[in-house]
Structures are given as C-alpha cells and as structure tokens.
Amino acid sequence: MITDPDILKKLIQQGSLLPKEEMLEIARKKGSLFIGIPKEISFQERRVALVPDAVSLLVANGHRVKIESKSGEGSNFTDNEYSEAGAEICANPKEVFECDIIFKVAPPSEEEVEMMPGNQTLISALQLSNQPKVILQKLMSKKITAIAWDYIRDDEGVFPVVRTMGEIAGTTSILVAAELLSSFSDGKGIMLGGIAGVTPTEVVVIGAGTVGEFAVRAALGLGASVKVFDSSLSRLRRLQNDIGTRVYTSILNPKVLAKSLKRADVAIGALRAPLGRTPCVVSEEMIESMKSGSVVIDVSIDQGGCFETSHITNHNEPTFVKHGVIHYCVPNIASRVSRTASFALSNIFTPILLDMGDQGGCRDLIRNDQGFRGGVYIYKGTLTSEVLGKVFNLKYKEIELLILGI
C-alpha cells in the first residue's frame, strides 16, 4: 500500500489526464402515436384523411396506423396499398374508433361517437353549421379532446386546410364551368377561354379571397376576360398584387355588378362569411337578366350561397336551370377531385402528426403550439369554443386557462 503523499499526488495527477467516459445528452423520448382512420360515411364524401405515402412515413417513425377497409376507395387507394405502407387493415369500424387518435375528414356522426370508448383525441373538420348539439354533449361526456382542422393555423397565421381546400375549389369551379358551357352538357357550346379572332369568354368572380383568387388564376390561364368583385378594397388590391397582372376589379356595387352579369358567360360565387350566412349579393332579377345558357357556380352554397336562386345540389344531380341559367350548387366541390384533395390534406397533417409524436403526444403539442391549440374546441371533455358555447347554450372555458394545468 502506497502511503508516501508525494507519490500519491503524482498518481492522482496522472489519473486526471486519462481519458474519461463521454457524457452524451439523453434525447427526449418520443411518443408513439396510435392513429385510427375510419371510412367516411358522410354523403358523397370521397376524401381520405391520410394517403398511403403519409402512412408509410408515420409507420417508419414508430407510429401505428389502423385504417378501416376500403377507406381509400373514393380516392382510388386500395387496401393493399395501405397494407404495404404498414397500416393495419380492419374490417370492423369499432376497432378503428378504439385508437388513441381518430383522424377523419367529416365530423363524426352520433353512431361513430358511440363507438369511441373515451379519453381519446378526435381530429376532423368542425363544420359549425352542421354540428348537432347532442354530438358535442356526447364528446364532452366521453372526455374527448376534439380538434377542428379548419381552425388550425400554421407558423404564418394562415388556416392551411381552409386555404388549400379553397385553392382546390377555386380552380375546380372554373373547370366545372368549362364543362357546363360545352354542347354535350346542354351548354351554349362555347370554350371557356379565348383564341385568336374569337371574343373571349367573360367570367365574373364575386369574392377576392382564396377561392376567388384561384378561380381568377384558372380563368386567366385559359384566356378568359375576368372581372372581380368584393366588398373589401384591400382584398382586391392584394389579389391584383398576388396575380401579378391587371384584371378588372370593383367593390360590390349592385348596379355595376348587374351590368357585368348581363354580359357574363360564367359567374363564380366565392364569398365567405366569418360567421353565419354568406351575404346574398345577386338577386333573382340579376339572374333573369343574364344570357341564356350562361353558368353560375355557387361555391358559397355551404354557407347559404350568394345567389338568390341557388339551392343545394349534389354530385349525382349537380345542376338545375332557372331563368335559362345553369346553376351548379354542390357544397363539397373538393370531393369531385378527392385524390388531389387527399394528398393536399396529407401534406398538411403528416408534419403535424410527426411533430406531435416528437413532442410526446397531443397534450404536449396543444401546450407548445399556439396554432394547433387554436383548433381545439373540446379539451378532455371541457368545451373551449366560445362560438359553440353561445350557439348551443353550453358552458365553456378558455383553452389558455386549461393548459396552465397541463
């Protein structure tokens, strides 16, 4: 045994120069998500919440995905594609509704809520105007955390789902109008657009939001002559700047609008109301003055429509004729191009779900992400939406107060 203090000191000094174990930072443990995708049962809803490519990415990151058989049929995705992507295919919808996170397109029906055991997360559209009180009460009684994807904001403060579906609806409305103008759709037999020596088609777009902007882009791309009306001068100015070319714009003056509609071949209704019914800005008298065989596409019909002559139609019988004008008033235009819409939804929500897993689950994402938190309308059975609380006379609490206890 060494007792000499000088020798001990030298040994300690030499030992301090020896390599030490490297202390690495321990990574935060990921949360493994268990996601269920049921088949959509809403009338003519053909979209699916996640495409096979998105499922493959989620599974590769350690998450489980259960999908009801034939959920992707409406968007031309097979069960085999989902199975190869790593999803578990279920014939019984009840198995899907037992997952921790239920991810779907349309709001749940009463029967679907009954299949949920409780204490889960539901992510879907809210569709405030179609939301029955009894479904809200059942979600609350089962301590569900419900998130409306149409109220989620991104890093720039934009509602990504609303904008993306608006882009699809705006572009598709012009394509639908082009088809309805053709001879084989009992139209006037004219091409939407313009060619050398032939007067271009005249298109009136009412509304300068996302739907209106992309309708204008599509119409201009085909060579049509476009006029845009909106009640907001700032929206009209922004549309001019974003498009990068001069188009006719006007505030919503009834006399000016009526004059433009008389000459129009196509009128697109693209107004949106922040809450409640869309303002009806085109009277029946204005419709009567339009040319016979002209086309009206009322994209605003899901909020009541902005044409007095509009009433809801569906994809099986999409049109009707009134005063010689062809009306197209299908509320869910995105389902007409369901595969494109499904890819668009997946592009938005795959990063959100991956982020949710990295942060440890839905609760942590709600706490840390203000944009995602904005979509929460029920948190663990407590209503957090002031609008729903006032509409249905239900008690509600601010989500900002609830997350203090998370």
Image (cartoon, rainbow, N blue to C red):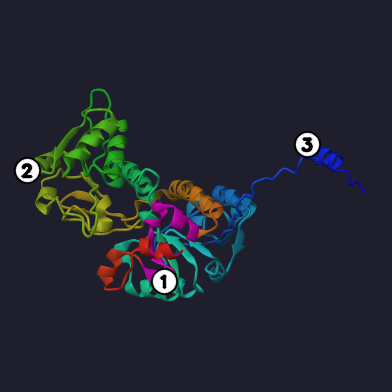
Q: Nearer the viewer, mark 2 or mark 3?
A: 3
Q: Position of residue 38 (x, y in %)?
A: 51, 63
Q: Position of residue 55 (x, y in %)?
A: 57, 52
Give yes or no for contact between labels 2 and 3 (Cβ–Cβ under 8 Å).
Answer: no
Marks 2 and 3, the one that precedes in the sequence = 3
- The type of residue carrying mark 2 is Lys
Give the residue number, with chain letter if any, for mark 1: 381
The residue depicted at 35 percent of the width and 51 percent of the height is 333
Q: Count residues near mark 1 (Cα–Cα under 10 Å), then give few for <14, some for 14-19, many for 20+.
A: many
Secondary element under disc 3, as helix, strand or loop, is: loop
Q: Residues within 10 Å of mark 2 (few under 14, many from 20)?
A: few
Disc 2 on helix, strand or loop? helix
Circle nearer the N terminus (1, 3): 3
**Relative to 261, 122 lies left or right:** right
Residue 325 shows in the view: yes
Residue range highlighted in magenta = 363-383
Kind of element beneath mark 1: loop
Choose between 371 and 168: the one closer to the eye.
371
Residue at the left extreme of this rendering: 255
* Above or below, 247 relative to 399: above
Identify the amino acid type marked 3.
Leu
Residue 234's label in the rendered image is: none
Quick check: 256 above or below 273?
above
Which one is earlier in the sequence, the residue at label 1 or at label 2?
Answer: 2
Q: Which residue is mark 3?
A: 17
Is 381 or 332 nearer to us in this picture? 381
Reading the image, the residue beneath label 2 is 255
Examine the structure image and report whether residue 364 is included in the region drawn in magenta.
Answer: yes
Q: Quadrant of residue 203?
A: top left
How far apart are the alpha carbons under marks 1 and 2?
51 Å
From mark 2 to mark 3, how far is it between C-alphas?
90 Å
